[in-house]
Image (spheres, rainbow, N blue to C red):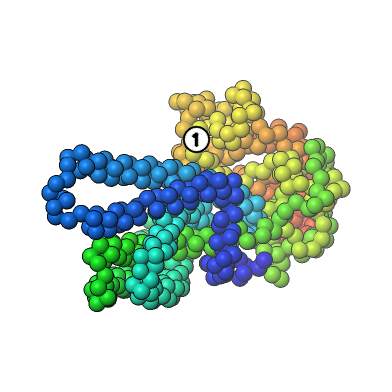
């Protein structure tokens, strides 16, 4: 899938047919079908029970004259009151059971959907994730799944209740008087046609509102993360103006929805009062008795009130289905990097890595690597050097299959990495990056990544192995010291040492260091250099570094330029060649 198609999916530009969308949404309720079925039965019982009142009122008007009312005994009055109270209690109890069943169903569905979306995002390649704004993904995982939950827990029961009420009421009205019912049928036809067009218009406006919400959340997420840069360069007013523009777009799209409903609701009310006036006029003209006219008046109220409620529920249904459409658009994005059908599980790597004529581009035909070939032997330490954009970090990312190559082969121990299960491949490779991310929690939870299989002693030994214990032991709470999101309460060097400890604890057989010593002070660099010397004994090590002092003792140094291997050899042999590496060395050390 190219970036243009991916963008269309994420912006919600791909339309899913209504019944396909509804079918996919309801498919998440498979395990809760019995709850939904039972809830529907209870809804029907409740609807029928509520409709007994107009029939009772008709009987009361037709059978009790003024004399009967005056002579009514206290026991009869109490009996009627108790019967009415029992009917109300029964109705509310049924409503309680409905709510419990559907709340359980809704929460089960949203849990499954949220987990599926999150798991799907985890399975995407870095190239795909780079095209997806964090704010847009957060909106889908959190906000949109909540709308789906609301569809099942609140909207569904009311929607079905009102639909059943309209149908049952109309059947009763036909039984009572087919002539008056035909008049209402005309009004019902107008309601149906207008609701159809309203649903079409409101659906488009809800899509636009969801799109604007996602854009605003994306803007917020990006700018809150980059607030330090905004402050440094005094960009507050500019960002306020940009936010105001996006906020105004969202307001306009939300206001457009309000306008649509502002026209729809009064029109439904107009039809309601028109139906009442017509019924009374025709009823008196055809000389219906008072009881029939009163009953029809009550039934008209019970016919149009649900229809007016359906307008509000249609709002929620459209909102939920629009959310589902955008969720399914995301789920329809097929991950670029997946396990092959014949992929194998590898438990142990010797560490031989081979690139064979590898070509790679993040974007079509914009090649980052061009026919790259080299071999890294087991237990070797190999460094990659070159100017920015030469492809160093890309090579390391391809080894762990963060991206998919377009041409060539990458082999580990003679096996094409496309034939190795991603999980076992990444488990064997420890990565230490320049930008270390620490999660909110404690030092202990960040080193172990909340894996309970590691005990406290193993965590402490890993920290001691990479010299991280030199500062952890000085913390007030030591390994239980709180870490805020991103590790902002630790220095760059401390975060890097914790990253080393995290990697060592998980016992990798191949180590990758991508500019791991770029942003640290001299004292911490000495600690890291000492750690690196120990790490060389673990397995094959691949290093990217701009500081040539950190890679002088590498077994092999591969020099890259413009996505191609320019030269390779150890430090001394490359200096003797007086090529590109020699120039880099002179720039850093001659003065």
Observer-nearest of 358 and 454? 454
Q: Is residue 200 above or below residue 49?
A: below
Q: Residues within 10 Å of mark 1 (few under 14, many from 20)?
A: some
Q: Quadrant of residue 537?
A: top right
Helix, strand or loop at disc 1?
A: strand
Residue 291, image quadrant: bottom left
Q: Which residue is disc 1 drawn over?
A: 441
Q: Position of residue 555 (x, y in %)?
A: 79, 43
Q: Quadrant of the N terminus?
A: bottom right
Q: Residue at x 29, y 70 (%)?
A: 272
Left/right of residue 532 with respect to residue 42 in the rendered view? right
Residue at 80 percent across and 48 percent down: it is 343
Residue 454, image x, y percentages: 63, 28
Task: Give whichever of 528, 85 is nearer the camera.
Answer: 85
Residue 295, position as x, y percentages in the image: 28, 62
- Image position of 127 (left or right of 275): right
């Amino acid at each position: 899938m190219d970036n243009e198609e991916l963008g269309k999916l994420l912006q919600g530009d791909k339309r899913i047919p209504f019944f396909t969308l509804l079918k996919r949404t309801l498919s998440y309720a498979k395990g809760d079908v019995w709850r939904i079925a039972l809830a529907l039965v209870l809804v029907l019982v409740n609807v029928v029970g509520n409709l007994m009142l107009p029939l009772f009122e008709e009987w009361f008007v037709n059978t009790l004259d003024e004399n009967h009312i005056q002579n009514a005994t206290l026991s009869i009055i109490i009996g009627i009151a108790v019967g009415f109270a029992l009917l109300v209690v029964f109705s509310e109890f049924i409503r309680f059971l409905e709510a419990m069943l559907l709340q359980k169903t809704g929460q089960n569905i949203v849990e499954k959907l949220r987990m599926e979306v999150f798991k799907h995002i985890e399975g995407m390649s870095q190239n795909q994730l780079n095209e997806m704004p964090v704010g847009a993904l957060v909106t889908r995982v959190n906000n949109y799944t909540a709308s789906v939950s609301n569809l099942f827990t609140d909207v569904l029961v009311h929607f079905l209740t009102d639909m059943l009420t309209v149908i049952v009421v109309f059947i009763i009205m036909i039984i009572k008087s087919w002539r008056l019912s035909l008049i209402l049928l005309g009004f019902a036809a107008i309601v149906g046609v207008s609701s159809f067009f309203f649903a079409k218009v409101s659906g488009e406006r809800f899509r636009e509102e969801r799109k604007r919400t996602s854009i605003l959340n994306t803007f917020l997420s990006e700018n809150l993360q980059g607030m330090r840069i905004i402050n440094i360069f005094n960009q507050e007013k500019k960002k306020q103006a940009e936010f105001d523009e996006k906020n105004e777009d969202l307001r306009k799209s939300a206001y457009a929805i309000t306008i649509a409903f502002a026209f729809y609701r009064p029109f439904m009310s107009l039809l309601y009062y028109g139906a009442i006036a017509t019924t009374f006029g025709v009823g008196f003209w055809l000389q219906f008795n008072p009881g029939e006219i009163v009953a029809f008046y009550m039934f008209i109220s019970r016919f149009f009130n649900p229809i007016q409620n359906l307008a509000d529920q249609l709002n929620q249904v459209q909102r939920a289905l629009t959310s589902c459409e955008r969720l399914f658009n995301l789920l329809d994005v097929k991950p670029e990097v997946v396990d092959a059908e014949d992929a194998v599980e590898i438990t142990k790597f010797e560490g031989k890595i081979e690139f064979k004529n590898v070509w790679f581009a993040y974007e079509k035909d914009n090649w980052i690597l061009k026919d790259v070939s080299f071999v890294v032997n087991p237990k070797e330490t190999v460094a990659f050097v070159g100017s920015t954009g030469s492809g160093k970090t890309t090579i390391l990312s391809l080894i762990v299959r963060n991206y998919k190559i377009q041409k060539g082969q990458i082999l580990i121990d003679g096996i094409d990495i496309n034939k190795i299960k991603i999980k076992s491949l990444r488990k064997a490779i420890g990565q230490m990056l320049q930008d270390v991310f620490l999660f909110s929690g404690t030092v202990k939870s960040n080193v172990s990544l909340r894996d309970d299989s590691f005990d406290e002693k193993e965590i402490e030994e890993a920290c001691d192995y990479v010299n991280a214990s030199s500062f952890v032991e000085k913390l007030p709470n030591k390994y239980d010291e709180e870490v805020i999101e991103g590790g902002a309460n630790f220095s760059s060097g401390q975060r890097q040492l914790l990253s080393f400890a995290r990697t060592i604890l998980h016992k990798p057989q191949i180590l990758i260091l991508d500019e791991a010593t770029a942003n640290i002070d001299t004292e911490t660099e000495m600690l890291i250099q000492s750690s690196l010397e120990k790490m060389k004994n673990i397995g094959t090590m691949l290093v990217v570094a701009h500081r040539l002092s950190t890679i002088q003792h590498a077994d092999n140094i591969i020099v890259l330029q413009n996505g191609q291997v320019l030269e390779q050899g150890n430090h001394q042999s490359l200096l003797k060649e007086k090529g590109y590496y020699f120039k880099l060395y002179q720039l850093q050390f001659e003065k």
